[in-house]
Amino acid sequence: MSLDTLTITEEHYEQLKKATFRSDGKEGAAFLLCGRSKIKNEIWTGKKEERFLSREVHLIPDEEIISSSTADVTFKHETYLKILKLAEEKDFAVALVHSHPKGHLYFSKTDDVGESGFFQLASNRNGSKRPQLSLIIERNENLIARVWQNNKTRPIALIRVIGKRITLHYEGKHTQLSKEEFARQALAFGPALNNDLQRIKVAVIGCGGTGSPTAMLLARLGIGNILLIDDDLVEKTNLNRLHGSSASDVKNKKSKVEVVKNAIQAMELDTIVKTIKGTVESKECQDALKSVDLIFGCTDDHLGRMILNRIAYCYLIPVIDMGLAIKVQENTSPPILQTLDGRITYLFPNEVCLLCRNVINPKKAYAETLRKNNPQEYEKQVKEEYVEGEGNPSPSVVTFTTDLASMAVTELIDRLQGFRGEHSGAAERRRKYITCEERRTGAAARSECPVCSNKKYHGRGDMIPFLDISL
Ligand SMILES: [Zn+2]
Ligand SMILES: [Zn+2]
């Protein structure tokens, strides 16, 4: 059996709430056009998953509403047929959204009969076999949804409402008993957080100085499913900061993902860890990346960050990207520190992307692609100074890489649970270790930015090539 899930941006969710909860207390309805992410091989289960990704809200104009009561709403189909046409052109799916102002969180008999006829009509008119969705927003903001296909329904197992906060809707969120191992954190944040953590699937991209402590903390926190991606083997110079590693891993040529996975499994917290020894831009990572609910960007390379930057917007998968900057004055011995800063950036539609924040340097991303694809041409261009060479290794110290990982994982807790209240939701935080300060850093999106300014990629889902990047 395949799995169906739905991701809605906070912005769209607010629009849908406004459209479906009418001021007169009666039911309202609206449409949500959804991009599609078809996962052939979900990395934890090996099953198929389809994710529907909110892209545009379409309101039903008043003149199309035929009748509305506290239990029912009927309308003409003009807007609906227009959206269906849009969906056919781009392989999108359409969700019919309505409210249950009286508060029942189930599809009523009226819903069953009404939707069956409604969706059948569309299939007949358009000859479409594509899935269509129905979503109910209940009075207390609980959500349920289902897929209609070939006049049959199947439930949507998970609905994510994602923006400044990450809110998950699934069966058992408030009733499941959380495990004793995590009882102490439930005392601080409540049991629902533990259930969310157990439920979500998180990727850690890069398992080095920041990635290895991030993965360890995620496992201790009770994340049920962790995916580790890194191409490197453990080297002697990693031992100062790679959590879980030992000198024998260097001798035995162990990969970083293997070492981190083994360390997590040794905790015996039932974490399901999947690994890919490879680079994030490789083809084998595509389905795996699409399978996760959140990504920690712990990579240093510009090409890797470029991929993650696009995934956040195209697939509505939030990315918490992190970076440590240690700079010393040139030609001084002993070194004199100029900068010692940690940064975390939260990427999602409505936030400014890493390109606009100058975290990604497109020229360096190009050089990295060339080095991988055509090493000879790369060497030639370095000599001719067309591209920059790799330079010296960067300084790195375990206390700072680990602190940064902790800062990033704490950000995840806040996004899910909201303990910071009005202090939540900074798109970027910088910790300055020399002066013991923490700052929220703002940035403006560039009007020409293809990723964050232009909405054409937001919730777009599958494209050819993947993420519209030719590598
Ligand atoms: Zn209903
Ligand atoms: Zn941008």
Image (cartoon, rainbow, N blue to C red):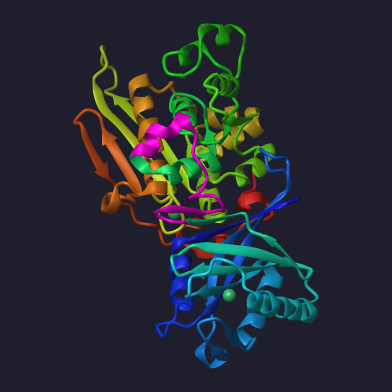
* Residue 35 is covered by the magenta coloring: no
Horizontal side of residue 211 vs 397, given as left or right:
right
Horizontal side of residue 437 vs 264, given as left or right:
left
Residue nearest the observer in this picture, 352 or 175 = 175
- What residue lies at 78% left-to-right and 72% top-to-bottom? 128
Residue 229 falls in image quadrant = top right
Count all numbered tags in the image, as a single digit.
0
Q: Position of residue 82 (x, y in %)?
A: 64, 81
* Residue 170 is covered by the magenta coloring: yes
Residue 18 appears in the figure? yes
Residue nearest the observer in this picture, 33 or 27 = 27
Q: Which residues are magenta?
A: 162-187
Residue at the farthest left position: 435
Q: Is residue 132 above or below residue 213?
A: below
Q: Position of residue 84 (x, y in %)?
A: 68, 76
Residue 394 falls in image quadrant = top left
- What residue lies at 27% left-to-right and 46% top-to-bottom? 440
Residue 73 falls in image quadrant = bottom right
Q: Position of residue 98 (x, y in %)?
A: 55, 75
Ligand 1 placement by image quarter: bottom right
Q: Position of residue 25 (x, y in %)?
A: 43, 82
Q: Is residue 222 above or below residue 89?
A: above
Instruction: Work out which quarter of the rendered image holds the C terminus and state it.
Output: top right
Residue 300 appears in the figure? no
